Image (spheres, grey):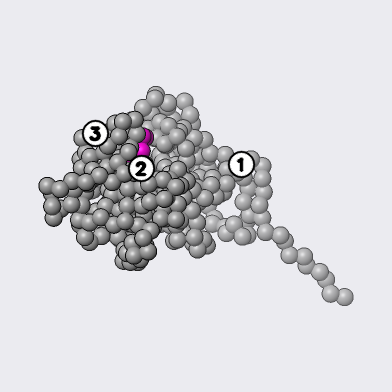
């Protein structure tokens, strides 16, 4: 049995920052994540993609943000159960919770914080009969390392921001980039649409619209895709390629957490945002993209704020009746559980003769 103060389900940016905030209050954390490494979507889906709205960082790669968050919280020595999914939860007579994973690992804590992002998610796959055979053989639904596409022929399918952004990004890496969308209009940011048009005019991107991929061709790997254009569905043609990347978004699911008795609204967990992001079950909180409340914004920086207030409420649950006086880290410094000490240098006061 793994015992801790706060059990965090989800090791994405919000969960990792919660470790730091809990550490400032002398509370230990343990994190459960179904992915094999911390970082959530930032690590699994777009580690090389830049993020522009993290305070203090005009631009930071998603993977680098994860690295920084891990460095920030390591002094508080969090525990990790990775590659396992939180399956069941049981409330004990003493008010604590026991959470068991799909592999049978048990965790006990007086506070549970669900920071699972979009929950468990799967890519929305195109309705192509043989696409499953080519998965990991040239068909990818996420781009983790753009370098694997260097000097390769790439076909991207989709009409949203991901399809546009990656077409732009890979135009400087791949030998050929073809973007296929079933409509002439795109759903992405206007400047991205303009950039794709500019790259098309420069011959760096081939744009095929309105059209869709209906088949994948190859023996042991992707050799080509079969395309049909909407204005002439009887005419099919092949585009030779090394990789086919359908980017149709994700289908988020709460998974087993949806059966925990929590109030759910549109596949998100309802929380009390007027106070501390607690759910309808006392002692269970939901922070980050997994929760919902009036005015909710699914931004990483909002998840950081929610994690901070959650930890304040968790402190009162774990230390009933004990008053905590907020001190700025610029004044109090940071004492890590590993014995480290970080503080601002003290000013030297010198007497005047």
Q: Is residue 138 magenta?
A: yes
Tell which of 84 and 182 is nearer to you.
182
Q: Disc 3 designates what residue?
A: 130
Q: Position of residue 136 (x, y in %)?
A: 37, 35
Q: Disc 1 designates what residue?
A: 337
The residue at the far top in this view is 104
- Extent of the magenta region: 135-139
The residue at the far bottom in this view is 353
Please state if 321 lies on the left or on the right of 118 as rendered: right
Q: Position of residue 168 (x, y in %)?
A: 39, 57
Labels 2 & 3 near each other (Cβ < 8 A): no
Distance of label 2 from label 3 (alpha carbons): 15 Å
Distance of label 3 from label 1 (alpha carbons): 52 Å
Q: Main secondary structure of the magenta part?
A: loop
Q: Residue at x 40, y 39 (%)?
A: 9
Q: Residue at x 63, y 54 (%)?
A: 333
Q: Which tag is nearer the camera, tag 3 or tag 1? A: 3
> Which mark is on residue 15?
none
> Which mark is on residue 243?
2
Q: Residue at x 18, y 52 (%)?
A: 229
Distance of label 1 from label 2 (alpha carbons): 47 Å
Q: Residue at x 52, y 35 (%)?
A: 79
- What secondary structure is marked by label 2? strand
Q: Which badge, 2 or 3, is on the more N-terminal residue?
A: 3
Q: Position of residue 108 (x, y in %)?
A: 44, 31
Please state if 15 lies on the left or on the right of 342 as rendered: left
Badge 1: residue crowd in 10 Å (few <14, some 14–19, many ≥20): some
Tell which of 219 and 311 is nearer to you.
219
Q: Which tag is nearer the camera, tag 1 or tag 2? A: 2
- What secondary structure is marked by label 3? loop
Quick check: can you spot residue 178? yes
């Amino acid at each position: 049995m793994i015992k801790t103060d706060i059990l965090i389900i989800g090791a994405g940016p919000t969960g990792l920052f919660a470790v730091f905030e809990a550490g400032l209050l002398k509370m230990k954390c343990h994190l459960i994540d179904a992915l094999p490494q911390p970082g959530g979507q930032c690590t699994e889906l777009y580690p090389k993609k830049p993020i522009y709205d993290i305070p203090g960082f005009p631009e930071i790669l998603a993977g680098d943000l994860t690295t920084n968050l891990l460095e920030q919280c390591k002094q508080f020595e969090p525990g990790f159960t990775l590659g396992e999914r939180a399956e069941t939860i049981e409330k004990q007579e003493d008010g604590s919770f026991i959470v068991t994973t799909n592999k049978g690992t048990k965790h006990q804590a007086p506070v549970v914080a669900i920071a699972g992002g979009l929950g468990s998610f799967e890519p929305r796959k195109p309705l192509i009969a043989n696409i499953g055979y080519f998965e990991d053989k040239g068909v990818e639904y996420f781009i983790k390392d753009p370098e694997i596409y260097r000097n390769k022929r790439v076909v991207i399918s989709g009409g949203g921001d991901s399809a546009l952004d990656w077409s732009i990004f890979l135009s400087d890496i791949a030998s050929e980039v073809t973007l296929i969308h079933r409509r002439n209009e795109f759903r992405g940011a206007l400047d991205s649409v303009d950039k794709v048009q500019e790259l098309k005019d420069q011959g760096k991107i081939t744009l095929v619209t309105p059209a869709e991929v209906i088949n994948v061709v190859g023996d042991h790997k992707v050799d080509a895709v079969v395309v049909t254009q909407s204005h002439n569905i009887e005419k099919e043609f092949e585009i030779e390629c090394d990789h086919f990347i359908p980017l149709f978004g994700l289908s988020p699911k709460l998974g087993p957490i949806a059966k925990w008795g929590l109030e759910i609204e549109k596949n998100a967990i309802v929380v009390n945002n007027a106070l501390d992001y607690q759910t309808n079950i006392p002692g269970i909180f939901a922070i980050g993209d997994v929760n919902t409340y009036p005015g909710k914004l699914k931004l990483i920086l909002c998840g950081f704020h929610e994690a901070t207030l959650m930890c304040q409420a968790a402190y009162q649950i774990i230390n009933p009746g004990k008053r905590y006086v907020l001190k700025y880290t610029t004044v109090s410094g940071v004492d890590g559980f590993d014995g480290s000490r970080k503080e601002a240098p003290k000013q030297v006061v010198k007497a005047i003769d």
